[in-house]
């Protein structure tokens, strides 16, 4: 078990260590969401399952969840006057 390094948690692997964790699209969405919320808030948003035992269906549902959350965050940011690039 890692002690705060790579392999410790999927979120830190994606954001801090720039590792490939779930799949290209999920990892990209996580990075995109991290531009709108704190890491702590992002940590609390999702059930960060073990990527090694993830089924294709689980990844698909996770990707859908990430997409929906990002869409909502972009709408909220726009409504609050953030400039979205």
Image (cartoon, rainbow, N blue to C red):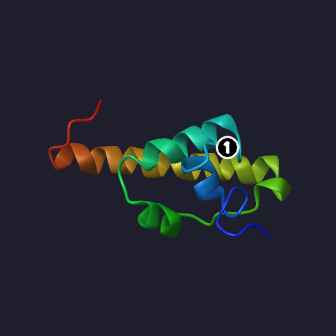
State the quadrant of the N terminus: bottom right
- Establish if 5 lies above or below 71: below
Viewer-nearest residue: 79 or 35: 35
Q: Name the residue tied to disc 1.
A: 19
Residue farthest to the top, as pictured: 85
Q: Determine whether the residue tagged by mark 1 lies in a helix, strand or loop.
A: loop
- Determine whether, in the image, residue 52 is placed left or right of residue 72: right
Q: Position of residue 32 (x, y in %)?
A: 45, 42
Q: Position of residue 82 (x, y in %)?
A: 20, 43
- Establish if 44 lies above or below 7: below
Within 10 angstroms of label 1, few (less than 14), some, or many (20 or more) residues? some
- Determine whether, in the image, residue 62 is placed left or right of residue 58: left
Q: Residue at x 70, y 64 (%)?
A: 8
State the quadrant of the C terminus: top left
- Determine whether, in the image, residue 25 is placed left or right of residue 23: left
Number of marks present in the image shown: 1
Viewer-nearest residue: 85 or 17: 17
Viewer-nearest residue: 38 or 4: 4
Q: Position of residue 11 (x, y in %)?
A: 59, 57
Q: Residue at x 73, y 58 (%)?
A: 7
Determine the image quadrant of residue 10: bottom right
Viewer-nearest residue: 60 or 13: 13
- Establish if 70 lies above or below 39: above
Q: Residue at x 64, y 66 (%)?
A: 4
Residue farthest to the left, as pictured: 81
Q: Position of residue 71 (x, y in %)?
A: 40, 44
């Amino acid at each position: 078990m890692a002690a705060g390094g790579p392999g410790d948690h999927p979120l830190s692997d994606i954001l801090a260590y720039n590792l490939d964790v779930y799949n290209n699209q999920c990892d990209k969405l996580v990075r995109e969401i991290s531009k709108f919320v704190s890491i702590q808030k992002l940590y609390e948003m999702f059930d960060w399952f073990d990527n090694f035992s993830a089924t294709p269906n689980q990844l698909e549902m996770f990707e859908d969840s990430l997409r929906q959350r990002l869409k909502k965050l972009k709408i909220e940011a726009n409504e609050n006057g953030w400039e979205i690039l």
